[in-house]
Amino acid sequence: MNITARIESDRRLINLHLNRVLKFGVAVPERLAAAMRYSVLSPGKRIRPILALETYFACGGRRRDWILPFCCGLELIHSFSLIHDDLPAIDNDNYRRGRPSLHRKFDEATAIIAGDALLAKAFEVFALSRAPDERKIRAIHAISSAIGPSGMAGGQILDIDQFSEMDYFRIAKLKTAEFFAAAISTGAIIAGASAEREKRLFKLGVDLGTLFQLTDDLLDYETDRSPDSSVGRNINLTFNQLQLEAQKLAKSTEMRFRRLGPEFDFFAQLTELILKRRK
């Protein structure tokens, strides 16, 4: 399998459907529609929707109209989280994906409202999936749990404070890893995988998401060694310690994906790709 070509093919498919989801009529104020499209349709990895799509196929799913609304909704939620993360009250980032962040391109009020609108729109899109209702409800529960107070929101509140070594990994799990895991669970649930397999995949998703956050922080630290970086703020962790943790986690996660069989070869290769990524 050429994983790079596979990722690019998945990304094109998801981008096509995101464009359709974000075509608004006169019912949506022009400024709000422009802000939502600016944020979501900027160049992005689309890794969370790709995880859902690839898990769906790996678990035997065949109907794209069952899973693609969930892929799009996951990306809308991710964009919402980035918009709010960049706000002056949180990270105060002026740039996102090489372009001005939304509050810099428009203004802070527009960014807050656009983020709220994207979060609401995601659940509207989930409802449009043609998957069986029972599967949709289970998937929506997994996603909402991963982004709520015991997930992403909880991780965000911890992330704005100083933290210890133990807190670092807790934050990585809550802020990033559980949403990764929910994307993988969503693909499994919508495909009709057993509860046992979905639970196993969720745990692997947590490890994959933790690895992604570790490599993200390592890349940030390489380009910004200031005390304000995630690693720089954490006096109990060194760059080398994080690097070692990432390598150990990648090896373990790749091995466990391979044990699931050839259907999950994509995920084994993706694990290695995440470890070695340079952006």
Image: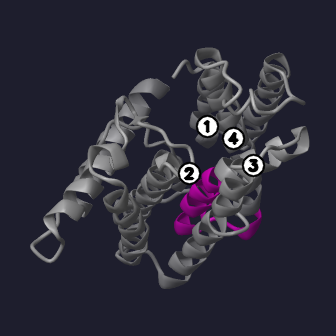
Q: Tell me, what colour scheme is on the image?
A: one colour
Q: Earlier in the sequence, mark 4 or mark 3?
A: 3
Residue located at (78% from left, 19% from top): 239
Binning the other alpha carbons within 10 Å of mark 4 as few (below 14), some (14 to 19) or many (20 upward) gives: many
Considering every residue shown, the one lying at the far bottom of the view is: 133
- The mark closer to the camera, 3 or 2, is 3
Asked if residue 206 lies in the magenta stretch, the reply is no
Identified by mark 4, the residue type is Leu
Q: Identify the residue under disc 4.
A: 208
Evaluate if marks 1 and 3 touch, with contact meaning CB atoms under 8 Å apart: no
Evaluate if marks 1 and 2 touch, with contact meaning CB atoms under 8 Å apart: yes
User: In the figure, is residue 27 to the left or right of 129?
Assistant: left
User: In the figure, is residue 251 to the left or right of 59?
Assistant: right
Q: Identify the residue under disc 3.
A: 161
Magenta stretch bounds: 179-196
Residue located at (27% from left, 50% from top): 106
Disc 3 is placed on an element classified as loop
16 lies above or below 67: above
| Residue 152 in picture, x, y percent from top left | 64, 59
Which labelled disc corresponds to residue 267?
1
| Residue 61 in picture, x, y percent from top left | 49, 59
